[in-house]
Amino acid sequence: MGIDGSVDDMIAKVDGLRGNVTKDRLDEGIVWHLHEDQRLSEGLANELGANRCFKIINNKYLTKNGL
């Protein structure tokens, strides 16, 4: 998955994500760690600021677990 678009785009990318190890279970989300030479798209940089590490939560995982 690329690190581009808006925060809403990133949330949509992980919504309903299933694990590689346990395919019958939803993943909690994805944590991105940028390499030193990597930059966020302008849209994400405007929303997230200078963060080099962030997590996008899978909304279906939260709903299923009652959070």
Image (spheres, rainbow, N blue to C red):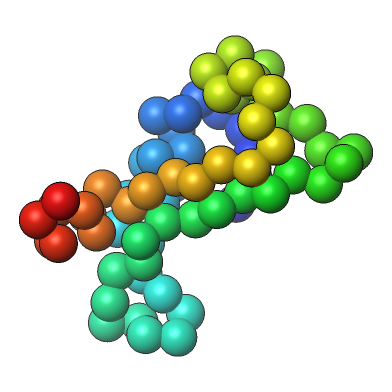
Q: Is residue 26 above or below residue 55?
A: below
Residue 43 visible, this orientation: no
Q: Quadrant of residue 11?
A: top left
In the image, farthest residue toward the top: 46
For this view, does 10 lie left or right of residue 5? left
Above or below for 11 versus 64: above
Residue ranking furthest to the left: 66
> Residue 63 appears at what percent x and percent y?
14, 53
Between 6 and 32, the residue placed more toward the observer is 32
Splitting the image into 4 quarters, where does residue 65 fall? bottom left
Q: Residue at x 9, y 56 (%)?
A: 66
Foreground pick, 9 / 36: 36
Residue 34 visible in the picture: yes
Above or below 20: residue 35: above
* Residue 58 point in image, percent of width and height: 33, 52
Residue at (49, 46) in percent of width and height: 55
> Percent from the top left, x then y, of residue 10?
47, 38
Considering only vertical position in the picture, is 12 above or below 40?
below
Name the side, left or right, on which 27 lies relative to 36: left
Which corner quadrant of the image does residue 45 belong to? top right
Left or right of 13 in this view: 16: left
The residue drawn where x is 41% and y is 56% is 29
